[in-house]
């Protein structure tokens, strides 16, 4: 059985076997390559096609409806090999003095898998033929890249799917057709320009007889045709570069993802330092199964689009137009599986965060003699160090490890501090630890295990700038809230370092946290009142001052007008 | 240069002359021209003829018209133009001179 193709030769339709078609079209393309535009290539080709149509139409009948390979072979035998045309060419060249310009449109070079010289799928030999490289080097490079987390293997599979196999002889010819390089494109542009020049000449004579309006019209048309062909050539180069770019970016991301999923570090960047996805697993998931599931989910959910990106880039680069339905469908299905896994995982993880619990820890404070409590963050705000030893990263705050990637614990966070009115006559400091868990018991356990340090020296209270969690514990949204309870009529002095942990501290003037530092604050009926804010010259303070002044003057005006009204009534 | 090439070059040299000559007895389309050439064993492959016809036409020696055919695609009938006839006459006299000259030398 053989597939047939319908072709139109000089206005006559022929059914032709696919392989015979391949041979005929490559034959015609080769002949075309022997003539330049100026010799009347189009006309010669039309004549030759006409003659071939005549010969073929004699070969078919009601009983034999299909043109076979045999018939094409016969036609080629009668018409002669392209080399014979070349012989004719040299003869005509003598009279014409024109250099032969072999058309680059004669044989387009395309990538196919070369199954004749294949070891596995013929990918390397096909690409080798395309770029004119010995496939041995490509094979070596591929084998080498197998060890880079198997990316070479993945790439090979992708290419195997993407690149069609060279089946017909025409496709096999196209495998090593005209080189696609800069000089070739230059040649193409040059040819187009020559073509354009000739057309202008012809048309110049033509329009001498016609009216000027039509003249302009044709000229513009021709001009844009020319521009179009030049831009077309550049566009092709651009598309190829874009393809290279996309493929490379996709490959890099893929390598990054795979390596961070199954090995070293990279991919996820926190605060300028990179962590592998696996680092986060221990502190997040409960079981080995979940970790495996997460790996699969991430691989499919992120990896499939990346693979498709590489696929798209390679397709652009080598100009493959054939659409492989299975690739798109397969990728779509795998991605949906990934999405499903992500949803399942999300559901499980949300189960791990189902319940919330808060632990309360009251620090007893020795009451200061002068009714003023000084608040400070231990060691100041800037005592923050990073250390890198080999692949281990340590982030230290106040000389204490907060992040250490060797134990893969990212357990650190900044507490949030508020200052409220206390119910009793003494200063109190309450530390609330918050955590989530799959049940209340776990949540409460985690909340209680949060480590946070507060200490007192006379009237100075020092807060740690961070809280931490024991190394072996999971991350379940741990958070620390500090409440400084100040009795009515007593004052606190907020030192500058407090800026770091203060979180929306309420006060009568709605002064921002950043502006509250280095000042004394008196606890009023409900909120803090500033005692030494006269020098407060921030925008916010000025605005507030203006507002107060306006309110006061408004109320005075109102009182006056009310008084006047009363007077009038009298 | 081998003998085959020389022979081919000699044949090709007179090819244009012969094409024009075949058209003196009336108009013809390429297949008829080729058949006559093949009969005389002048043309080995057909493909060589088409570029020549196109060139002669572009030089103004030939003109053509389309005629419908019952058994295939339309045919391109070539005809000698007055310039072509003049050209042919000159070639014929050149050919006669050439034959005489060659005979004189070879005998």
Image (cartoon, rainbow, N blue to C red):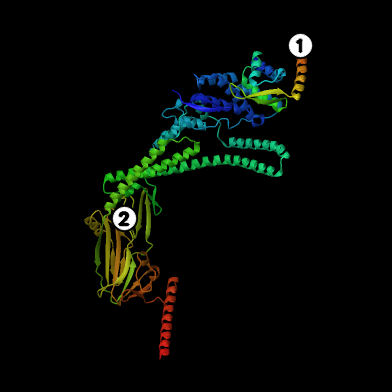
Query: Which residue is painted at 41% across and 29% down in the image?
Result: A120
Which residue appears farthest toward the top when viewing the image? B107
- Residue A299 in sight from this viewpoint: no
Residue A489 position (above or below residue A63): below
Residue A20 placement (x, y as % from top left): 51, 23
x, y (%) of residue A231? 59, 42
Q: Position of residue A409 (x, y in %)?
A: 31, 52
Q: Nearer the viewer, residue A405 or A488?
A: A488
Chain letter of the residue carrying label 1: B
Q: Residues within 10 Å of mark 1 (few under 14, many from 20)?
A: few
Instruction: State the SS at label 2.
Output: loop
Instruction: Examine the image and state in which quarter residue A24 appears.
Output: top right
Along the viewing direction, whichever of A195 and A502 lies nearer the viewer: A195
x, y percentage for residue A184? 59, 35
Chain holding disc 2 = A
Which structural element holds mark 1? helix
Q: Is residue A311 above or below residue A10?
A: below
Q: Kindly identify which numbered label has been placed on residue B35.
A: none
Instruction: Tell me, for residue B105, which label it has, or none.
Output: 1
Q: Quadrant of the N terminus of chain A?
A: top left
Examine the rendered structure and indicate whether residue A370 appears above or below residue A306: below
Q: Check residue A411 in the rendering and tell me which mark sits there, or answer none.
A: 2
**Quadrant of residue A160 within the rendered picture:** top left
Quadrant in the rendering for residue B11: top right
**In this view of the protein, which residue sits in the foreground, A114 or A427?**
A114
Side (left or right) of B96 relative to A37: right
Q: Are marks 2 and 1 on the same chain?
A: no
Is A356 on the left-hand or right-hand side of A113? left
Whole-number angstrom distance, CA of label 2 to CA of label 1: 109 Å
Q: In the rendered view of the protein, which quadrant contains the C terminus of chain A?
A: bottom left
> Could you tell me if residue A180 is visible in this image?
yes
Image: B97 above or below A174: above
């Amino acid at each position: 059985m053989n597939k047939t193709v319908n072709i139109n030769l000089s206005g006559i339709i022929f059914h032709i076997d696919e392989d015979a078609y391949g041979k005929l079209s490559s034959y015609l393309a080769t002949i075309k390559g022997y003539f330049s535009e100026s010799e009347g290539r189009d006309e010669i080709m039309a004549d030759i096609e006409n003659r071939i149509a005549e010969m073929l139409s004699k070969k078919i009948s009601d009983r034999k409806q299909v043109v076979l390979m045999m018939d094409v072979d016969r036609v080629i035998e009668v018409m002669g090999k392209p080399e014979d045309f070349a012989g004719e060419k040299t003869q005509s060249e003598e009279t014409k003095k024109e250099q032969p310009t072999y058309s680059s449109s004669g044989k387009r070079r395309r990538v196919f898998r070369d199954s004749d010289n294949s070891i596995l799928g013929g990918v390397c030999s096909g690409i080798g033929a395309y770029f004119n490289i010995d496939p041995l080097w490509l094979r070596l490079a591929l084998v080498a890249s197998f060890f880079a987390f198997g990316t070479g293997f993945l790439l090979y599979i992708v290419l195997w799917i993407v690149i069609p196999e060279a089946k017909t002889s025409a496709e096999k010819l196209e495998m090593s057709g005209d080189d696609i390089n800069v000089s070739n494109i230059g040649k193409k542009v040059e040819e187009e320009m020559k073509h354009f020049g000739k057309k202008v000449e012809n048309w110049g004579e033509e329009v001498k007889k016609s009216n000027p309006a039509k003249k302009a019209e044709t000229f513009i048309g021709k001009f844009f045709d020319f521009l179009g062909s030049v831009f077309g050539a550049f566009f092709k180069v651009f598309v190829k570069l874009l393809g290279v770019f996309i493929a490379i970016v996709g490959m890099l991301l893929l390598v990054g993802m795979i390596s961070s999923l199954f090995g070293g570090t990279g991919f996820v960047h926190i605060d300028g330092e990179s962590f592998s996805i696996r680092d986060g697993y221990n502190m997040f998931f409960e079981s080995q199964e979940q970790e495996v599931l997460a790996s699969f989910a991430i691989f499919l959910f992120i990896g499939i689009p990346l693979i498709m990106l590489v696929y798209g880039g390679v397709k652009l680069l080598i100009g493959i137009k054939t659409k492989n339905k299975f690739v798109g469908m397969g990728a779509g299905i795998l991605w949906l599986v990934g999405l499903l896994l992500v949803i399942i995982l999300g559901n499980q993880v949300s189960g791990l965060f189902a319940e919330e619990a808060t632990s309360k820890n009251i620090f007893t404070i020795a009451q200061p003699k002068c009714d003023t409590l000084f608040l400070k963050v231990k060691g100041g705000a800037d005592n923050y160090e990073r250390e890198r030893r080999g692949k281990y990263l340590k982030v230290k705050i106040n000389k204490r490890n907060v992040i250490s990637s060797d134990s893969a614990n990212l357990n650190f966070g900044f507490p949030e501090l508020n200052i409220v009115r206390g119910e009793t006559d003494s200063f109190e400091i309450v530390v609330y630890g918050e955590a989530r868990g799959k049940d209340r018991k776990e949540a409460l356990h985690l909340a209680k295990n949060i480590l946070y340090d507060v200490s007192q020296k006379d009237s100075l209270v020092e807060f740690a700038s961070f809280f931490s969690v024991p190394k072996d514990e999971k991350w379940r949204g741990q958070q620390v809230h500090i409440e400084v309870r100040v009795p009515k009529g007593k004052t606190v002095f907020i030192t500058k370092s407090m800026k770091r942990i203060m979180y929306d501290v309420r006060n009568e003037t709605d002064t921002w946290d950043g502006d509250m530092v280095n000042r004394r604050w008196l606890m009023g009926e409900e909120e803090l009142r500033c005692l030494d804010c006269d020098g407060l010259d921030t925008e916010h303070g000025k605005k507030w001052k203006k507002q107060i002044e306006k309110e006061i003057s408004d109320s005075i005006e109102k009182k006056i007008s009310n008084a006047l009204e009363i007077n009038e009534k009298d | 240069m081998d003998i085959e090439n020389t022979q081919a070059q000699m044949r090709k040299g007179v090819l244009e002359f012969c094409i024009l000559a075949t058209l003196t007895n009336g108009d013809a389309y390429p297949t008829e021209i080729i058949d006559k050439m093949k009969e005389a064993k002048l043309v080995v492959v057909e493909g060589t003829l088409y570029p020549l016809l196109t060139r002669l036409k572009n030089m103004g020696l030939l003109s053509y018209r389309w005629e419908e055919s019952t058994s295939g695609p339309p045919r391109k009938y070539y005809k000698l133009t007055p310039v072509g006839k003049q050209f042919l006459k000159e070639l014929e006299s050149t050919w006669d001179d050439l034959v005489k000259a060659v005979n004189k030398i070879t005998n």
